[in-house]
Amino acid sequence: MGNIFGKRVTKEDDVIVLLGPTGAGKSTFLNSALGEDAARVGTTLSSCTSEVQIVKCPIPDDHEWPEGDV
């Protein structure tokens, strides 16, 4: 399908873009959603994520979700 910032993207890939001002919690949200420290989180009002980051993560099919968690 193409490339996004040098990473190969296919029709099977789901692309999610997080946008917002500095300090909005984008990196914190990403880390929480993935359950791991994929993005560095700052502790001051200065930006610590100043470049575009691409994070690949698995997205389970609906049948893989435990009952009651959807």
Image (cartoon, helix red, strand yellow):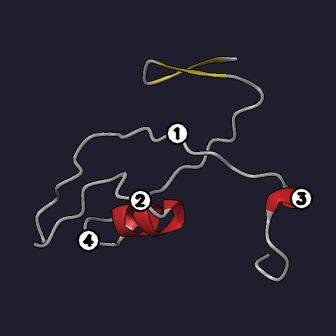
Q: Mark 4 belongs to which amino acid?
A: Gly
Secondary structure of the residue carrying numbered label 1 = loop
Of discs 3 and 4, which sits in the foreground? Answer: 3
| Between 46 and 9, the one nearer to me in the picture | 9
Q: Mark 2 belongs to which amino acid?
A: Glu
| Between 44 and 40, the one nearer to me in the picture | 40
Q: Mark 1 belongs to which amino acid?
A: Lys
Q: For the view shown, which residue lies furthest in the bottom direction?
A: 68
The quarter of the displayed image where residue 11 is located:
top right
Q: Which residue is mark 2?
A: 36
Alpha-carbon distance for marks 3 and 4?
Answer: 35 Å
Q: Which mark is residue 63?
A: 3
Horizontally, residue 23 falls left or right of residue 18, namely left
Alpha-carbon distance for marks 1 and 4?
Answer: 23 Å
Residue 24 position within the rendered picture, expressed as x and y whole percent measured from the top left: 34, 72
Secondary structure of the residue carrying numbered label 2 = loop
Residue at 34%, 58% in the rendered image: 37
Q: For the view shown, which residue lies furthest in the right direction?
A: 63
Residue 9 position within the rendered picture, expressed as x and y whole percent measured from the top left: 62, 24
Residue 20 position within the rendered picture, expressed as x and y whole percent measured from the top left: 39, 63
Secondary structure of the residue carrying numbered label 3 = helix
- How many residues crowd mark 2 within 10 Å: few (<14), some (14–19), many (20+)? few
Horizontally, residue 60 falls left or right of residue 28, namely right
On-image quarter of the C terminus? bottom right
Q: Which residue is mark 4?
A: 23
Alpha-carbon distance for marks 3 and 2?
Answer: 23 Å
The quarter of the displayed image where residue 47 is located:
bottom left
Q: Which residue is mark 1?
A: 56
- How many residues crowd mark 1 within 10 Å: few (<14), some (14–19), many (20+)? few
